[in-house]
Amino acid sequence: MEISDSVYANTEIFKSFDSRTRVDQNSKNIPGDELSDKGVVNERDQLKTSNTNLIAQRDQIKSEKNRLQRWVEKSCSQDWKEFNSTLYYVSSGVRTWSDSQQDCRERGAHLVIINSREEQEFINGLRKNVWIGLTDSKTEGTWKWVDGTTLTTEYWQSGQPSNGGITDEKDPDTGEDCAENAIFQYWRNGKSEDCADCQRGWNDAHCSSERKWVCETEASP
Ligand SMILES: [Ca+2]
Ligand SMILES: [Ca+2]
């Protein structure tokens, strides 16, 4: 029997119990009936608990099914790349940091959160300067990922984050509060050097600047 059938069956049984107990409450107490009434009430309460548990199980299965569907849709789409059992979307256009994060949300994802050396190398390997999900816009100097977590591993370029050299920030929009992974910051002989092998690509930039961006979504089932 499917869970939804069990939930339905239990609900029907409650109705029957409820009508029986209502009738019993209105009728005169007959000696000897008290025990059986208690039994009925206990059984009804047990069924109610069991039904609540089944509803919770059904909702959990529904949510897992939706997650699997989203995963299949994304992994079948050419827009998403799989790395280390996680899916990434790399934009072709450019946007501000907050518009980029909004785009990721609309895709059921968030700007990439980099928490391993392998992931940093993967982002470097995209060979693009991209927004990542890191900002200090709430408290200057306190860098947080878009999920509210603080940094565990850091890959700042030398001299970064600099806040654009602004130390006395009267206007909160003047500093650099959004992080990009900028692998084309390295120059040699007047040309930008592809720095795919460089570990440290992070730079803080003005949030209103426009960049490509990378979204990240849930791990594979
Ligand atoms: Ca800053
Ligand atoms: Ca900077």
Image: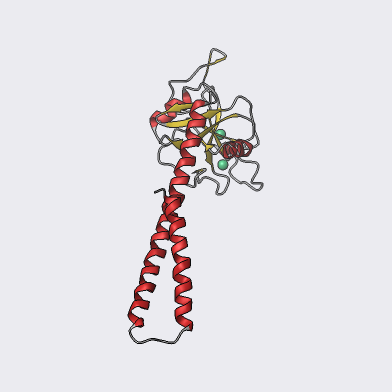
Query: From the viewer's perspective, is 193 left or right of 220?
Result: right
Q: Position of residue 22 (x, y in %)?
A: 48, 77
| Residue 200 lies in quadrant | top left
Query: Along the line of sight, which residue is nearer the eye, 181 or 108?
Result: 108
Query: Along the line of sight, which residue is nearer the eye, 170 or 54?
Result: 54
Marker count (numbered)? 0
The residue at 46%/20% (across/down) is 196
Question: Vertically, is 10 above or below 210?
Answer: below
Question: Vertically, is 41 above or below 80?
Answer: below
Query: From the viewer's perspective, is 12 left or right of 212?
Result: left
Q: Which colour style is shown?
A: secondary structure
Query: From the viewer's perspective, is 179 left or right of 152?
Result: right
Query: From the viewer's perspective, is 194 left or right of 99?
Result: left
Q: Position of residue 11 (x, y in %)?
A: 46, 61
Q: Position of residue 142 (x, y in %)?
A: 50, 46
The residue at 37%/72% (across/down) is 40
Name the quarter showing ligand 2: top right
The residue at 60%/41% (across/down) is 166
Any part of residue 217 in sight? no
| Residue 118 lies in quadrant | top left
The residue at 40%/37% (across/down) is 153
Q: Position of residue 151 (x, y in %)?
A: 44, 42
Any part of residue 134 in sight? yes
Give the quarter of the figure containing the C terminus.
top left
